[in-house]
Image (cartoon, helix red, strand yellow):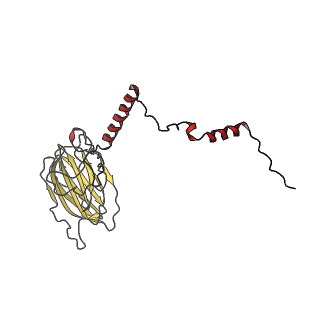
Amino acid sequence: MERSPTPHRLTPSRLAAHVFAARGPAARGPAPDRRLAPHRLTRGGTAVLAVLLGAALTTLAACGDGSGGAGPDGAPAPRTNAAPSAPGGGSPSADPAGTPGADGPSGTAGDDGAAGPAAVPSTWGTREVRVEHPVTPPARLVALRAARNVQGGAAYDRLVLEFSGGLPGYTAGYVDEVIRPGSGAPLPLRGPVTFEVVVTPAVAHGAAGESTLTTPPTGGELSGLVSYALAGDYEGYVHLGVGLGSRVGFRVVELRDPARLAIDFAG
């Protein structure tokens, strides 16, 4: 038995769609124009835009600023900071105020101190200075010399003992008189004030008993350091006497390359 198709139910919404389609495009009216209409800037918006544009130009100008111009790739060169200087435009100084410089002499002392001190110099004063330096075999005293020096406006006399084989220990200070080791006789010195330097372990002679000094064993003739003389070389101790014009502050400086012991007398 043949069945007829079931009719579709026509709802109001479907009816409207059919009617709209039957009327055609002409009946629908013109399509709306979807192009955006240009925005109108108010006076307030124009002012804000001008402020933003000015800030952007200022930022670009700051990024392009630099000292030294542009680098090889066109980028601004990096900035460099100048090194700080000491007050008054001079170089910083590590010397204590009111004392002669801690470095080597700037006057007539030759190369003494040119390599810099091997240890921190003793402070200026009048007390005895004693330092131990074990040396094996004993160091040999090879030279004695003295010179007047001026540094930083301060003058001082420097006595230098030069050694080969290292720097021995030492004792330096004021004494009533210098006694020759072995004989016990006093050492004659010119100058009203007496100062003594004793170094150990050290010698001032070779294997055959000859002197190892390449300079005279006596000297002086300076404004403050009137005289000095080798007092003796006995059983690993070398004694040196110094005659001074007055009792002044002194310091001891250890120097290297070659090994030297410098005693500075203020004034």
In the orientation shown, which residue stands out farthest toward the bottom? 208
Residue 203: percent from left, percent from top: 26, 65
Relative image position of residue 96 (x, y in whole percent): 27, 42
Instruction: Indicate the position of residue 127 as horizontal and vertical percent values.
Output: 29, 45
Residue located 16% across and 57% down the image:
110
Instruction: Please state, as top left, top right, bottom left or bottom right, where the N terminus lies in the image.
Output: bottom right
Which residue appears at 40% of the width and 26% of the height? 44
Give the residue furthest to the right.
1
Q: Is residue 191 left or right of residue 83?
A: left
Task: Identify the residue at the far left of this view.
Answer: 221
Please indicate, yes or no, whether residue 184 appears anywhere in the rendered image: no
Q: Is residue 31 left or right of residue 226?
A: right
Vertically, is 206 above or below 8?
below
Q: Nearer the viewer, residue 174 or 151?
A: 151
* Residue under the image location 23 percent in, 68 percent down: 205
State which quarter of the image contains the C terminus: top left
Q: Is residue 250 visible?
A: yes
Position of residue 171 relative to residue 211, above or below, is above
Left or right of 55? Residue 18 is right
- Front-most of 8 and 87? 8
Q: Position of residue 6 (x, y in %)?
A: 80, 47
* Number of residue marks: 0
Along the viewing direction, whichever of 114 and 50 lies nearer the viewer = 50
